[in-house]
Image (spheres, rainbow, N blue to C red):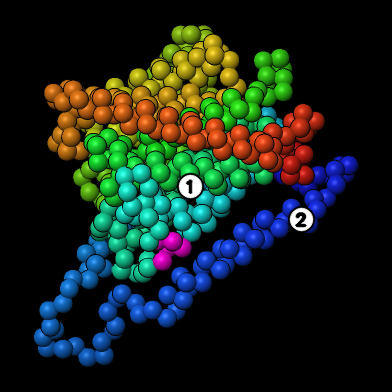
Amino acid sequence: MATRSDITHPRKVTHMKKFLPMLALSLFVLIGAVPAWAQVASAPANTAPVATTTPVAAPAAAPNPAAFINSGDNAWMLTSTALVLMMTIPGLALFYGGMVRKKNVLATLMQSFAITALVTVLWMIIGYSLAFTTGNGFIGGVSRFFLDGMGLDAVNPLAPTIPESTYMTFQMTFAIITPALIVGAFAERMKFSAMLWFMGIWLLAVYAPIAHMVWGPGGWLGSDGVLDYAGGTVVHINAGVAGLVAALVMGKRVGYKKETMPPHNLVLTLIGASLLWVGWFGFNAGSAGAANDRAGMAMAATQIATAAAALGWMFTEWKAKGKPTILGICSGAVAGLVAITPASGFVGPGGALAIGIAAGMVCFWTAVYMKEMIGYDDSLDAFGVHAIGGALGAILTGVFAVKAIGGTAGVLEGNIGQVLIQAKGVTVTVVYDAVVSFIILKLLDMTIGLRVTEEQEREGLDISLHGEQVL
């Protein structure tokens, strides 16, 4: 149970001038939204007016996009959107919250919740437009600034059988969980204000361009044949690499490798992992954009790979450490979910099984041994699971892709070059993400600072940043 702390700190109340940037941002949002509101209020709707009488023979007219909206597809995509949102709140929040120390639980939950709200607003203002409208091979345009022109009958050519509002919100949930995943790398030591600034800038400077390059109309990597069904590059490599850069720039936690840092509550982690597993069906099968046969295969592949990875991690840990753990099997399941994400709409059951087994074993090694050898403090293994798992899944997509399922053959069907194309997508994502994330982090560190003080870190972020605690 969380209660307000009655501890009085000597820290002074923040001066009014610190609220001026927030006030300015709020005014910008309100002013910028005026054209969109005006359009809704005054511009004629794209839908046809309701007729009071039915004509005997209506004249020929251009087809209304709404006439092609499939109610079954829309119902499935609405469900998928809710499932993917559930992955972040409460799924990821609980998964991460259970793994941190007790004094940082609420701060970790707060980060996921605040990111959800922040990204939603930024996605509505400009993020969606930059990622999913026509621009160039690198970035989209501004035709959907403040979702301008998105009426009831608007559709995006990328998902022509559902309303664009549904598609926009579905993609919003992907944009939400990606920065939320980064939190796992720098957990327990970043300022809340710095976290908000980093996530907001990173969304627009890194996530939106990568999403456009891979998924957007005319995107460079997608046009070159890079296969990423649901976000191996866009979501997982992106988040994991940014997390590693953040962990390296900020440095290790106070007492790392000198003090024990046990997870607070692995029951929360198990519940969070379970919600992630279920929500991932919306993530992968929902990426079909319709309730069709490919969505069904993506769902089957997701379940198979996740189970295989959970077992792969569990047995590998059992052999290496002498005992299987609940944290291990949960981490293995997440590794399988990550690795099958880029492949789920391109591979069959056999490929999914192989990808899952590989993910469980490889990600165990990277999260446990590689981190130890290199010596970085990736608090909750965001890099070891998401970046490595995403890269592994992306490369293996080029091996196991089945032309009859996704339209592109892999190595096993004679298309050896697909692996090279996949490697190109991974490389571009890693390099671009690492460079831009580093620049953002260094600029923030030089201006507002990234890290809490040692005193705040030892006290715990729940009390020092939020004035709350778990009893």
Q: Is residue 334 left or right of residue 17?
A: left
Residue type for callout 1: Leu
Where in the figure is residue 439, as x and y percent of width and height?
55, 35
Location of residue 29 (image quadrant): bottom right
N-terminal label among 2 and 1: 2
- Rendered-image quadrant of the N terminus: top right
Location of residue 229 (image quadrant): top left
Magenta stretch: helix, strand or loop mostly: helix
As measured in the structure, the alpha-carbon distance from the residue carrying label 2 to the one carrying label 1 is: 26 Å
Q: Is residue 61 above or below residue 296?
A: below
Where in the figure is residue 413, as x and y percent of width and height?
14, 25
Element type where label 1 sits in the image = helix
Query: Is residue 299 part of the magenta span, yes or no?
Result: no
Say the numbered circle drawn on residue 418. Answer: none
Q: Residue at x 68, y 24 (%)?
A: 253
Q: Residue at x 50, y 36 (%)?
A: 436
**Pointers 2 and 1 in contact (C-beta within 8 Å):** no
Where in the figure is residue 325, as x and y percent of width and height?
52, 19
Q: Residue at x 48, y 47 (%)?
A: 204
Residue type for callout 2: Lys
Q: Is residue 318 above or below residue 120?
A: above
Choose between 213 and 178: the one closer to the eye.
213
Asked whether residue 104 appears in the rendered view, the answer is no
Q: Residue at x 67, y 55 (%)?
A: 21
Element type where label 2 sits in the image = helix
**Residue linked to disc 2:** 17
Query: What is the span of residues highlighted in magenta in the rendered image?
Result: 144-148
- Rendered-image quadrant of the C terminus: top right
Choose between 429 and 102: the one closer to the eye.
429
**Residue linked to disc 1:** 204
